[in-house]
Image: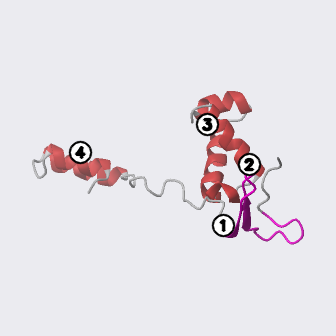
Amino acid sequence: MNPVLNRCPVCQSELIITRLNCPTCDTSIEGRFTGGHFAHLSVEHLDFIETFVRCEGKLTRMEDELGLSYPTIRNRLHEVIRAMGYEPGKDEPEELDDERRRSLLDALDAGEISADEALKALRGEN
C-alpha cells in the first residue's frame, strides 16, 4: 500500500478524503473525511515522530540516533508541533522574571504572604 497523499501533485492544494473502502468485504463509504492532525504532516515530520516514539520521547536518545544536536532536535519538534496546529509552550506557565521572583521572596521573608502563597506564585499558579 502507498502512503496517503496530503497535497495535490498538480497545484499543491490540500487533498480531502472522499471515499473509504473495506478490503475485506468491499464496502465503500463516500463523503468528506478528515485525516486528522497527522494527515497534514510531511514525510519528514512523520519520520521524526516515528523516531520520537521509538526513543520514548527522550531527546537525548534522539541526539544519538539522528546525529543531531539537542537544540536542532528541539527545533524540529517545535516544527512538528506547529504543523499539527499547536503552539509549543503555550500551555506552560509563564516564567517569572528575576524582579518578580525577588519581590515574592521578599514578601515571604517579611511575612506578607504565606509559604504556600509564595510557592503557588513561583509555580505560576496565581
Q: In this view, does 86 lie above or below 60?
A: below
Tell me residue 93's x, y (percent).
Answer: 38, 53
Position in image of residue 57 (x %, y %): 57, 36
Specify which label sits upstream in the sequence, 3 or 1: 1
Local packing at callout 2 (Cα closer than 10 Å; few below 14, some 14-19, many 20+) is few
Helix, strand or loop at disc 1? Answer: strand
Q: How far apart are marks 2 and 3 (CA)?
A: 30 Å
In whole angstroms, how far apart are the C-alphas of marks 4 and 3?
34 Å
Observer-nearest residue: 93 or 113?
A: 93
Question: Of tags 3 and 1, which is closer to the observer?
Answer: 1
Residue 114 rendering spot, x and y as whole percentages: 13, 47
Relative placement, left or right, of 12 versus 58 is right
Q: Residue 24 carries which label?
A: 2
Tell me which segment is drawn in magenta.
Answer: 7-33
Which of the two labelled residues, at mark 4 and mark 2, occupies the earlier sequence position? 2
Q: Is mark 3 on a helix, strand or loop?
A: helix
Taking the magenta stretch, the answer to whether it contains residue 57 is no
Q: Is mark 2 on a helix, strand or loop?
A: loop
Q: Nearer the viewer, residue 53 or 117?
A: 53
- Which residue, given by chain and number where applicable, does mark 4 sit on? 119
Quarter of the view holding residue 73:
top right
